[in-house]
Amino acid sequence: MTNIKLSLRSVSLSVALVFSLNAFANKDKNTNELNESLTIGIEKSLPLTQGVDGLYRNDGVAAVISEPNFIISNKINGKTENNKNDFILIAKEYLRSNAAKFGLNQNAIENLALQFVRTDKEFSVVRFIQQVHNIPVYGSSIAVTVNNKGRVTFVASNTVTGNLEEHKVLLDSLTSFSQEQALKIALNYLRIEATKFTKANYVIFKDTQNNVHEAWHFKVIPAKGNGDWDILIDSAQGNILRAENKIRNYSATAKVYKTDPLSTVKLKYGDAGFADNIDNPKSSNSSQQPKDTPELSKARTLVTLPDVTFINNNYSLTSKYAVCDDFESPNDNACPVQTANLFDFDRTNKYFDAVNVFYHIDNYLRYVNETLNVSVMPYQYKGGVHYDPHGLGGDDNSHYSESSGKLAFGQGGVDDAEDLMVVIHELGHGIHDWLTHGNSENDAENGLGEGTGDYLAAGYVRDIPENLWKPTDPKYNWVMRWDGHNPFWPGRVSNWHIGRKYPQDVIHTGDNHASGQYWSSCNLVARDKIGGQAMDKVFLSGLSKTVESTNQVGAAQAIINAAKDLKYSNDQIKGIAYAYNTVCSYNVKIPITDPEE
């Protein structure tokens, strides 16, 4: 095997390519079983212990600091609120002063690489990653929140500890496997014949046994099938160190109207006129062909699309917030381009799904960015969110891809694109990813990502006047009311916290969708307490402070701390605390408003 000398300072590469090779795909395996069999080297989410100032790992290293009590008041005096360099300086100085708390020495602090600075009106989040000899350390995020008075108000950390510098000799040696060779190993392992997206980076990786490796880190989206793989290959030995499918998906079906067809008339799936195929209303066959009915047609609402594209005398579904894009199988060109400015299709027309998704993504991101004043858009590309209304090969599923930053919706059962709660749930995965710049959490124990999607979706539909369900109605708490709660799948609920406590009833479900219901339910209690817009704003602002290892308690602490940063009233903060600590069992620390601020 040929040895290749690496230029370690410039090994990061991002390319779009199609890479063909012979693979040994086991076509007969169930997709979930295949994902499970290929998953390797995933670190388990460990319990955190409440300390005086935050949450700590079992090795004594801080994971969340909710009361940093650190300020450099002469660096920001209120006149340089948008100077990112000031926030970076303060964040770095805080980490220098508290290096031991995060299991790092001063040399490690000085070698931190700036990843991203997110600036909001009242505070900024400065993100760093660790480096060793200018090589990034995999999974080593530190997010420091600094308010406009120069005070550090919150820190979330996933530091990789140990004396990584001891591996200097290894790092300076020749590697046995080039990037191209390592990619072949990765694709063979994943049974992938061709890719539509590949991104490569050279990293330092500390495995679950605390062994340190140099590795090729690939993000791979297969050209066929469903997946968004994050995989690491040992550059010296060529073995698989870690593999995880990071696709943001759920098993469901959907139809999209301004709300869902059932909520406008307070009926359930299967009632007269309200089924995917009225000839077989009790069928669970997700491959059956949908049929329209007078009732479903009447449920459509005429809405305004405030921003579309008009080029060469044609209107298309492209705005500053949403872009219809046919990038997944079945590649049926379901994005309409037409001379008329009225997009009027029944639900059996292939263009109907595209229009529904476009309306809800555009409407929701307009609400987040312009009403809430929380800036959030994809970092993977410029412009609106790309979505495919008919993706996943027509399967009964939908997903958000972290690598590409795009959404896709399946057509099995009720078309997923027809249920606004499915649309906003998947968009919620994207928002979570974009707020944290690629450092969102969604493991099977905490399900923060799934719960975030459900929270945003449930809050959105509750605010729509056409939704006639009231809090006293059981169906008020149904999530995916049209796509789920039917013969295809049972759906989820937004009052799952009742009779349950965190963590004992939440983190051992084995299903991030189930665990996430606690997170969504508790935050919806807070939303009812302080109001929709107030809670949505602080929820998203707090979420922006988190890293990939932040659990539900850490995220709850980030949110209630953000309420202080955003200068929420004591009553509002107490309302959030009531939801988190009385109705639910997060037991977060309640921040006290500083009179100086």
Image (cartoon, rainbow, N blue to C red):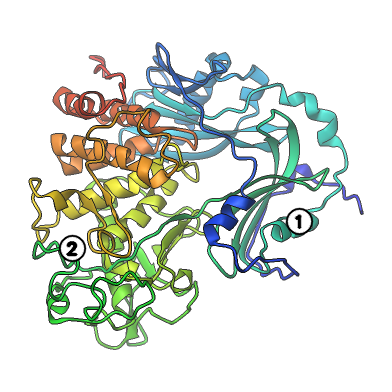
Vertical side of 232 occupied by 313: above or below:
below
- Characterize the local packing of mark 1: few (<14), some (14-19) or many (20 or more) Cα atoms within 10 angstroms: some
Looking at the image, is mark 2 or mark 1 earlier in the sequence?
A: 1
- 407 vs 202, nearest the viewer: 407
**The quadrant where residue 66 appears:** top left
Vertical side of 346 occupied by 594: above or below:
above
Residue, disc 2: 259
- The residue that appears at 68% across and 68% down in the rendered structure is 193
Q: Residue 473 appears at what percent x and percent y? A: 9, 50
Mark 1 falls on what kind of element?
helix
- 590 vs 347, nearest the viewer: 347
- 399 vs 158, nearest the viewer: 399
What amino acid is at disc 2? Thr
Residue 538 horizontal side relative to residue 465, left or right: right
Residue 594 horizontal side relative to residue 442, left or right: left
Mark 2 falls on what kind of element?
loop
- The residue that appears at 40% across and 14% down in the rendered structure is 53
Residue, disc 1: 185
What amino acid is at disc 1? Ile
